[in-house]
Image: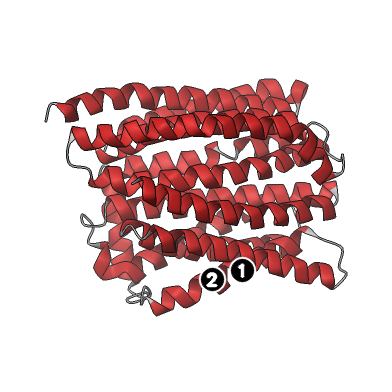
Amino acid sequence: MLSSIAQVLSYSLVANIFGGITSIIIIRMMSPDQFAAYTVVIAIISVLEGIIVSAFNRIFIVGYKRFDIGEEMGAFFAAQLVVLIVLWLAIWPFKGGTPTLYVLALLLALALCATEFLRTAYQRVLRFNRFSQVLLVKSMFFLAMLGAIMLCGAHMQAWHAVLAQALAALTVSLPLIIRRKMLNNFFHLNTALKTICSILSGEYIYLFVYLFVLAFFSQISVFMLNTLSDKQNLATYGSAFRYYGFLLIGLNSVKSVYVPVIQNALTGAEINKIFHKHRQLILLSLPIFFFGCLISNWVIPLIDQGKYPDAPVVFQVLSLSALVSFAFSPHITVLMKSERFLFLMILIVIGFSLNIIINYLFIPTYGALGAAYSTLIAYGFVNSGFFVYSRKIRLSYERM
């Protein structure tokens, strides 16, 4: 397992380098107003991606055999796209921005849906090299397209970055999806609807609701800043959130290995072995975390040219929440394996409500920093609940 993690992390490191360069370009070249608009659009896309991509693709792994997805993979993918478009039409009246930007954002959401569907197919069969290469090549194409925009002498707008990211994702994913014949039975919409109904009629409805709320959970601070604060605070949080996102890529890469490995574990001894290796990874990540927080006080002002002076401390608080989530990540997978979906749903709903309340109290006074503290407290509460219940389940596996 450690070799798979090392492989995924190595690709993620290189992808982070390209992603870091693109973020520097976007943050430096966009005005605060444009970057604030871009932050809201990316937050909406992240929510949709979490609802559709994370929910469907987690079910793709956990329920692959149960729902006989292999024979109807194309229909399963089509179902994701249909539900994504329906949700997009539902939020259209609340877009609050230019129609062109949000139409392009729909294109980006569809493109990311295709990319993540491809990566999940590789993840399910433990082909972690391909899983990581897709992300790396997408990051390279995105950087190349931003470079082309700069060479044309255009002033960087939010829609430029959204369109470039969408084209990069489609360029990488569609040829591979077609080559792997993953679109077979794509137009079997009747089969896709039956699959969705079978998922939503059983206990998997709780998993779907959990992932639905989780998608909003990670972005609620952006939406509340957009409502309760000014553009400067929103852009500051968006800037810090971009750097935080690079950290999450590496941490999520490790979690992407845990999901199928723990899912395939048969005994308590195998699961305990995985947790032992995870504790080693936490110890290895601590120096990186402290070093990143230390240098952020100097590096971030260099990147944003002092436009967002509070971004370093906001990043440091968000980084701590990422470290907490990473430390507890295998416990969530244990709950997934044992299908404790109702518990997951109840806990995330409580955590989401807590997040809203703290944001409402903190943002008017502390702005972007208040939103970051709200994220840290809410994530800490939810992950503590995962840890306590997961420990009980692991003890039951040990007695098997």
Look at the image and tell me in which quarter the C terminus lies. Answer: top left
What secondary structure is marked by label 2? helix
Tell me which residue sits at (84%, 55%) in the image.
29
The answer to whether residue 366 is left or right of residue 133 is right
Q: Residue at x 40, y 79 (%)?
A: 179
- Provide the residue designation for mark 2: 172
Looking at this view, name the residue that lies furthest to the left.
Answer: 400
Amino acid of disc 1: Ala
Q: Secondary structure at mark 1?
A: helix
User: Circle 1: is it few (<14), some (14-19), or many (20+) Cα within 10 Å?
Assistant: many
276 or 226: nearer the viewer = 276
Q: Which mark is residue 267?
A: none
Q: Amino acid at mark 2?
A: Val
Q: Residues within 10 Å of mark 2 (few under 14, many from 20)?
A: many
Specify the label residue 168 is tagged with. Answer: 1
- Which residue is rendered at x = 37% and y = 45% of the image? 2
The spot of residue 346 in percent (x, y) is 38, 29
The quadrant in which residue 144 appears is: bottom right
* Circles 2, 1 touching at the beta carbon (< 8 Å): yes
Q: Position of residue 109 (x, y in %)?
A: 57, 60
What is the distance, in whole Å, between disc 2 and disc 1 at their CAs? 6 Å
